[in-house]
Image (cartoon, rainbow, N blue to C red):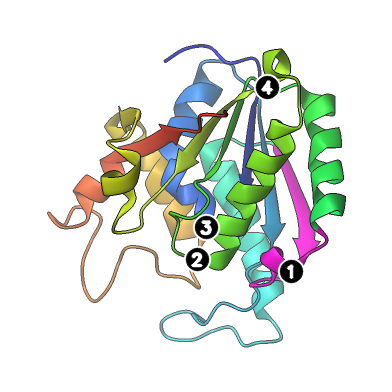
Amino acid sequence: MEQERHILVVLPHPDDECGVSGTLVEHIKNGTPVTYVCLTLGEMGRSMGNPPFANRVTLPVIRKKELEESCRAIGISDLRMWGLHDKTVEFEDREALIERLGALIQELRPSLIITFYPGFSVHPDHDATGALVVQTVERMAAEERPTVYCVAFSKNCEAVLGPPDIVRDVSAHLKQKIGSLESHRTQGLFLAGKKSYEDEEVKPRLVTERFWTYRFT
């Protein structure tokens, strides 16, 4: 793994970071500072825990605490919560967000940004967040642009994008990744029914993290 100057993670929901948590743990252990911008608190999510212990009023407060706990499990100390409304990122003032993100990139000077691949990430907030990152970085001079790694998981992503550019085995950091997942107790991530993290259907999804490098024209 190459040493990065600074990594900026831009994702829309609490728990989105779980999918890249092993990669982040490894970078942090290598001494790379990581800043995580989480755009919303996921307050429109339908899962309230199993059995339910949250409701529509308390969910954003609980999910904020879950996000903070997840970041502690990963080792992220610089968490920025932007407070956008869940499920409406695509309708936000795009120019205002580009200006805000551009200012943050100028502040941090990241060598790598991690986000979703626009158009290949299933949820409208995921796609809108990836598009925000791409549009912001596009406006930078080519020689100043950070590398952008994108997560994609739509059914057609490999058919269109080709195989991922980076496939990372994060089994060495599985403890921290499970800690991140378990922090999001309202969401019950990965554990449908009675499956455990050792389940043969679950574990392969945990130990492999895949990224596509966004190629600017």
Q: Earlier in the sequence, mark 1 or mark 3?
A: 3
- Of badges 1 and 2, nearer the viewer stands 1
Residue for badge 1: 91
- Of badges 4 and 3, nearer the viewer stands 4
Residue for badge 4: 145
Q: CB atoms at circles 4 and 3 under 8 Å apart?
A: no
> Front-most of 139 and 43?
139
Secondary element at tag 3: loop
Query: CA separation, marks 4 and 2?
Result: 26 Å
- Of badges 3 and 2, nearer the viewer stands 2
Q: Is residue 35 magenta?
A: no
Q: Which residues are magenta?
A: 78-93
Q: Earlier in the sequence, mark 1 or mark 2?
A: 1
Query: CA separation, marks 3 and 2?
Result: 14 Å
Percent x, y for residue 43? Answer: 66, 75
Q: Amino acid at mark 1?
A: Phe
> Front-most of 44 and 56?
44
Is 169 on the left-hand or right-hand side of 67? Answer: left
* Residue 12 visible here: no
Vertical arrangement, residue 69 with respect to residue 84, above or below: above
Q: Earlier in the sequence, mark 3 or mark 2?
A: 3
Q: Earlier in the sequence, mark 4 or mark 1?
A: 1
Q: Is residue 89 magenta?
A: yes
Secondary element at tag 1: helix
Rendered-image quadrant of the C terminus: top right
Residue for badge 3: 15
Query: CA separation, marks 1 and 3?
Result: 22 Å
